[in-house]
Image (cartoon, grey):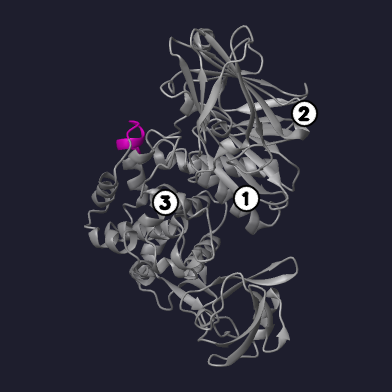
Amino acid sequence: MTEVLDSMSQISTLASTKLRYEVAMPDPTSHLFEITLHCSLGTDDTLDLKLPVWTPGSYLVREYAKHLQDFSAVDAQGARLPWQKISKNHWQIQTSGVQTVTIHYRIFAHELTVRTNHLDASHGYFNSGAMFFYVPGREQDAIAITIHPPDPSWHITTALDPVPNQPSTFLAANFDTLVDSPFEIGTHQVYDFEALGKPHQLAIWGAGNYDVDQIIADTKKIIEVEANLFGGLPYDRYFFLLHVSAKGYGGLEHHNCCSLLYSRFGFRKPDSYNRFMGLVAHEFFHLWNVKRLRPQALHPFDYDQENYTDALWFCEGVTSFYDLILPYRAGIYDAKFYLKLLSESITRLQSIPGRHTQSLTESSFDTWIKLYRPHANSRNCQVSYYLKGEIVSLLLDLQIRQQHHNQRSLDDVMLQLWQTYGQKDLGYTRAQLLDVIETIAELDLTAFWQSYLDGTVELPYEEFLNPFGLEVVAEFGEHPLPYHGLTLSSQSGKTLIKFVDIASPAQTAGLQPGDELLAWDGFRIQADQLEQRLQDYQSGDSVSITLFHDDQLTTHRLTLGEPQPKSYTVKPIAHPTDQQKINFHQWLGIELAELT
C-alpha cells in the first residue's frame, strides 16, 4: 500500500513540476549531450539561469560553463526569445508575456573523472551539477529528468526515483537532490545485493580483472562496519558506480550513491585491491561525514562561487583516517597491512616541505586555489588536508583512547556529532566541532588545536604512539644517498626539474623548476638514473650540474647534503611494557607480538 501511495505522490508531483529536463545523446561519438529544459513561468519579464561552477565534494571552481554551447530559447509557439549572458555562468532570457520557455543547449563531455561528464560510443555519464541550470529563487522546485538513450540496449542507473508509467523519467525533489544524483547510461553491468536488510547495487562500466563476488562480499563488510559505528544506515537504497579504465583514480560521494574510478587491472594484486577497498570505505563514510554531517559553510551549498570553510581537514582528513582503519576492522586486511598504509601516509607527509608553511585549517580554507592547482612551489608552501588531516585524526583517536583506557575513541566523537548535527540536518560551526571533541575526550585540547590545526608544529608521533607500544622509525635504505632537493620528470625525451625543495642544496646552487637537466659531473643523465648515480657520492661532495635555463646553457656547482630518510615505518618498540601491550591489544584487537 505504501508503494502505491508513493507512486501516486510522484505522479502528482510530476504533473505539477514546472522544470523538466530532457537529455539526449543522438551521436555519442561527438561527445555532446543535447539538453532541453521546459520551464513554466510566472509573471516575471526575465528568466535567469545559472550553471554551477563546482560540484560538492570536489572543492575547485571548475567552470562547467566552458563546455556549454549552442544555447537557444523559444516560446510555446517556437518563436525565438532574446537572451544574453550576464556573467560566465549566468544566462538571462527576455520572457515578457510568455508562459512557457523551452531552452536548448549542448554539453561537451569528454573528461572521464568522477566529477565531470563523459560520453562516447560505450556509455554516457554525467554529474548533474555539470549539466543542468538552476533558476535562482526556485532551487526548491521539483525537477523532472527524462533520458533518451541512443540505443534501446542502453539502460539507466541513478539514485533518483523513477516516475511510474513515465519511461526513463526520474524526479528530483529539488536542485540539491539533482546535483547529488549522477547518471550512468549504457550497457554497464548492474549487480543487486542486500546489506543490513536494504537493497544495494554495484554498477560497473569497463572491462578489468575485478572479481564481482569478492567486491560485493567485501563491500558488504564495509557497509556493516560503518553502519555499526553510526547506529544504522540513513537511506532506503544505495548504489556504487565503478568506472574502470586504463588510468585514473578517484571517488566522489553523493547522498545515496558514490562514483568510483579505478585502474582496470588494479584488482588482482592484494595491495592494489586493498587500496581499492579503502576507496570504497572512504566514499561510503562520506554519506555520513560531509553529505549529512557538514560544516555550516557547506549548509546549504552556494553553486555560484567558492564555499569557504576551515573544516575540510575534518570532512576529508577524518574520512581518510577511517578509510585505513575500517577495512582492517572489517577483516579485509590485517594489522600489518594497516600499519604499512599508515607508514606510507607518514612518509608522504614528512617528505613535503610545505608542512612547515601551511596549517591544516589554512589548507582547508585555501583548497579552492591551492590543493587542485599544483605549481612549481606547491611542495614548499602547502600540505594536503586529506593527508595531514588523516594523521592528526589518528593522533586525536589515540589521545582519546589513552585518556579513557580505550573505552572511548574518535568513534564516539563521530557518533555524537551525527546525533547532534547530522541526524537533525544542522550544520556545525568550528567552535561546536571542537567542543564535541573536547567533551568526548574530557581534555582541554587548546594547545593541540593551536599546534597541529592552526599551526605548523611538527607532529610528535612518539608522544601518541608510544603508549600503544609503537614508534616511527626513519629508514635511510641500505646505502643512504646524499641529499640534493630535486624532483625530476621526463617529458618529450627531456629531463626536467619539476620541483626544487626550499633551502635545499639544489636551491642554494640556483637550480630552478622548469630547467632542463643535461649532465651530472659532465655525463648525460636522465630522471630515472639519478638515484643510481648518487651511489658514487657522499654528503659534502661538489657536483657540476649542466642544464638549459630558458634555452641558455649554464653550469652550476651543487654541494650535496646529509642523507634524508627514504621512508618512515611504524614499528613495535623493542621492549614494550605490559600496559603498552594491553593498550595495543585493546586498540587493534591483536597482540603486539604478532607484528614481529
**Image vertical order of residue 34 relative to residue 115, above or below:** above
**Image vertical order of residue 445 relative to residue 53, above or below:** below
Q: Residues within 10 Å of mark 1 (few under 14, many from 20)?
A: some
Q: Which numbered tag is attached to residue 27? A: 2
Residue 180, visible in the rendered structure: no
Residue type at the position of mark 3:
Val
Q: Nearer the viewer, residue 543 or 273?
A: 543
Query: Which tag, 1 or 2, sits closer to the chain's start?
Result: 2
Q: Please state the extent of the stretch shown in magenta in the rendering.
A: 418-426
Query: Which tag, 3 or 1, sits closer to the chain's start?
Result: 1
Residue type at the position of mark 1:
Tyr
| Residue under label 1 | 249
Q: Is there CB contact under 8 Å for labels 2 and 3?
A: no
Residue 481, visible in the rendered structure: yes
Q: Identify the secondary structure beneath mark 1.
A: loop
Q: Residues within 10 Å of mark 2 (few under 14, many from 20)?
A: some
Q: Could you tell me how far apart the alpha carbons at marks 3 and 1 are, in whole angstroms? A: 20 Å
Provide residue 151's location: percent of width, then percent of height.
78, 23
Q: Identify the secondary structure beneath mark 2.
A: loop
Provide residue 53's location: percent of width, then percent of height.
51, 38
Residue type at the position of mark 2:
Asp
Q: Nearer the viewer, residue 142 or 154?
A: 142
Q: Identify the secondary structure beneath mark 3.
A: helix
Q: Residues within 10 Å of mark 3 (few under 14, many from 20)?
A: many
| Residue under label 3 | 318
Query: Which tag, 2 or 3, sits closer to the chain's start?
Result: 2
